[in-house]
Amino acid sequence: MSEINKPSLSQYFGAEENINLDNGINDTSNKIKDIQLNDEPNAVDKQEPEVCRLFSESLPQPKDPTAAFFDLIGNSHTTGSNGLISDLGITSNEDVYSPRVAVGSEADRRRDAWIPSEKTRQCLIASATAPPGTYTVDRDMLTMPGVLLEEDLGDSVGDAVSMCLGEAEAAQRRVLNAADVTQDERGLRELVQAGAFRSAINLTARLLTIYGQGRGRSGFQSKHSPHSLQLWFTRIALLVKTKAFNVAQAEAEPFGTLDKPDLYYQFYPEMYKGRLGSIASFSFRLLLGELPMHCGKAKDSLTRLFNILATVRQMIGNLKRGVCEDGNPMEITESDRADSLRLWNGREVRVMHSIVNCALSLKHYDLATDILGQLIDREGAPRATLLSALGRLHLQMGHVASAEQCFSEAREAQGFPQNAPLGFRELVDRGLLAVAQNSFDDAYVSFQQASALEPSNIMILNNMGVCLLYGGHLKEAIAVLESAISSNPVHALHESLLLNLCTLYDMESSRGRMKKWALLRQISRYQADAPTSILEKLYG
Amino acid sequence: METEEHLLALKVMRLTRPMLATPLPVTCDSKDLPGNLLNNALQQDPTAVHGAETLCTGQFLLLPQSPVNIYLGETFSSYICVYSETKDVVNNVTVKVDLQTSSQRLPLSMNPPTETLSSDDTVNVVIHHEVKEIGTHILVCEVSYQTITGNLMTFRKFFKIQVMKPLDVKTKFYNAENDDVYLEAQIQNITNGPICLEKVNLDASHLFDVTSLNVTPTGDSVFGKTQLMHPQTVCQFLYCLTPSEKLSSDLKSLRGATNIGKLDIVWRSNLGERGRLQTCQMQRMGPDYGDIRMSVVEIPNFVVLEELFSIKCKIINNCERTVDLMVYLENVEGIAWCDISGRKLEPLPPHSVKILEFKCIPILPGLKSIAGIKLLDTFLKRTYPYNDLGQVFVMVNDRKEELDDDSDDEDAYPVSA
């Protein structure tokens, strides 16, 4: 099954099929965790050692099969993607696990490893060495999040439809919402899969209530678990995806940089029994690092991301020195060490990507070029892809000659003979180069050739449309963009393409409004959600 | 602006370079709660680049969504679309586009008339114009047409454009003793975004040969790989201009050679948006050479203590009469002349040149200035003292023979025992 759909980016874009398969198992494990947390609403003081011990013993049981299950999936991936260099240069950590019983804890340890700040480390040591129940932490060392959005998010597309097209039209709209799915993680995934991000955000608020972190709970003490932090990660990720950046920032604020002691397993020795590392996942850490940049504070992001990068590099250094990620001299096998190195090297690359993006948003092109250059020089890096990306970066800053050079190096890196016909990537890059040289007609020809290779590619159709406009062919431009939508409405009803099309409609006639409403009707039919900016454009 | 109803309407859109749209990369590990759903969503985003989804170097062209400044030297491009607002056919549609600047009115486009325009048709005009003036420009679009009843109708629309200054160029000149002119040009980016300098050239007047001092001996730019300038930053360029052979022998025209040339600057910004500026003719202050000018032609860098050496000087008569000159050599500290003081030179005709050789012996070690030479114009009784013609480094050396040959070689350093 997974051999047919082999993942192109093994770690970040693994095959989708395992989601459905793992739901059941994950859910059971989560339910168990839910119960455990419900039983201890004010557990921060850890007054109930017996209960805790009981749970800490039972906890590894549901976790292990899950891990082993992932490992099996991971193994079958390996057969599919063996020999392929993953496109981002991120090699999958899951690929090489052998389904041993103990592997779960090692995989968890590896994934959760993190080096706390000195202050947090001291606090964790103090809490671990104090007799149970005697250690209290300052309030400002605790993480006390709560849902801040006062009300559930509504169906913005539905509202726009009823406003522009009438209630009758709005009544026909069928979308999944939070009430239609099971009130758990599986339901949440169903909503995300359907693209109903706003409803999914609503569901996270309900689920967080179970942890005492729902509406109005910000500033109150509560206990953290992998599951509660995963809910928060999902919620904030979706808030970012729906561009509700200010809400995301406000709700993420209590988490800071995920360095408070209560976000480490060590803080709950009775419950996690010697388990070390960060309860929050690395993805959450990265998301919080990137968050300020979406709110116009890209410099803060830069600081956070470089801090993350420094820690990751320190951990890689530790692994190379023969100790564990966090500097702990614990013994790990050579194959585990190799897996750890692969995982953390992959994460290092991902952080560097985020730094490039942050530098781009600051128009700090020197930094972006520098980091991209470092990525290109890494061993096993997908040079062709990255050189092409560097070429586009040069185009963006206006350095046309360098861009051209990058594109030709990218072509060489692919190792094709000189006279081989241009591939899709090269045709697109050549088109963009022509755009930079103000030859939109040449650009159109390149894009058209690329389109012959991938006729359903929405980006190519869009670029052809844009070139047609610059060449003075407004009607044809509109026709191309409309054809992209009609051939693949689910994906082509995309914010950027819609912005382009609306701009063209505005130019073409005074009947632009009717055409925009027709787009709105399509969105209502095919999309669960749409960005507010585009909706405003449609009914404006 | 217009009071009457028209059957046609007109829209204008400025065509600045498109942007490259990218998705907002939100990813997670397969073991995070959303599994691969977020990654899949990112991968399927049409603005994502396959294989580089998490990098925001996009490829999806997005039309400009917000007004962009226009700067002097850039090309102003616009799309003008005339469409019909009636179901009837309209005849003989002409669209005339002019640009009114503070000083002139430039015709940008004059389409041949469109004979018939049906209700779904449009007349499309794309104009390009390199802006050469700062300040307010008005784009004037005039549409004329004939209604079905034969009435000739005209309407005009005006669009205001503010052209701003992109660069601030400051120049300084230095006239060197050997007649070379050094030009220092400071170019400051005063746009609100980063720009890339694609070309900075000094188109010198034909009187000078230019050497650009902005590249390293290996031919790389001294500014590094990309000449990227963030807003408000300054790049300093240095050029050496050597007067042409003909010019340097004629002091009067050398002094009059105040035209240095023009700086030609090409820059690019967002996605290759190009701008080009040429400064006006740059002027230097001509050096004042006086009637008589003496300069060093040949002088050794290193000389050996108590050993004879010679320097060669060039005397130019820069006035319109023949001059009679006396040469006086005065003793100065460290140098003993080995020549005749108070000798009379042959009459020097107007604009002629004479090479003189002086011999002397250094009597103190160290860096010494050649001073003490005086010329006397016997007709005007005017003296011209020369107290800093050049410098020599006087070495103490006990292996004189070896050094004699390369005494003017910069690499020959004193070897002390």
Image (cartoon, coloured by chain):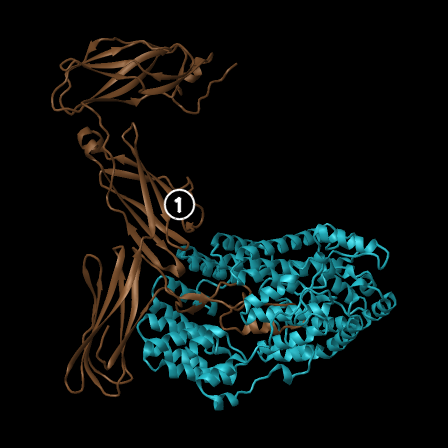
Chain colours: A cyan, B brown
Which quadrant would the N terminus of chain A be assigned to in this image? bottom right
Q: Is residue A204 left or right of residue B408?
A: right
Q: Nearer the viewer, residue A183 or A402?
A: A183
**Left or right: where B280 falls relative to A3:** left
Q: Nearer the viewer, residue A125 or A251?
A: A251
SS of the residue under disc 1: strand
Q: Is residue B140 left or right of residue A273?
A: left
Few, some or many residues within 10 Å of mark 1 (<14, 14–19, 20+)? some
Q: Is residue A409 above or below residue B286?
A: below
Residue B365 in view here: yes
Residue underneath mark 1: B234
> In this rendering, does residue A5 appear at all?
no
Quarter holding residue B176 = top left
- Which residue is rendered at x = 26% and y = 88% of the image? B87
Residue at 44% over, 74% down: A497
Q: Say left or right for B292 vs B178.
A: left
Q: Point out residue A364 in the picture as x, y percentages from the top left corner.
A: 48, 54
Relative to B401, is B14 above or below? below
Where in the figure is residue B350, as x and y percent of width and height? 13, 23
Question: In the figure, B352 relative to A93: above or below?
Answer: above
Front one among B211 and B91: B91
The location of residue B11, given as percent across then percent down, is 29, 74
> Can you say which quadrant of the picture contains the C terminus of chain A?
bottom left
What is the three-letter code of the residue carrying label 1? Val
Question: Residue B314's x, y, as percent?
Answer: 24, 22
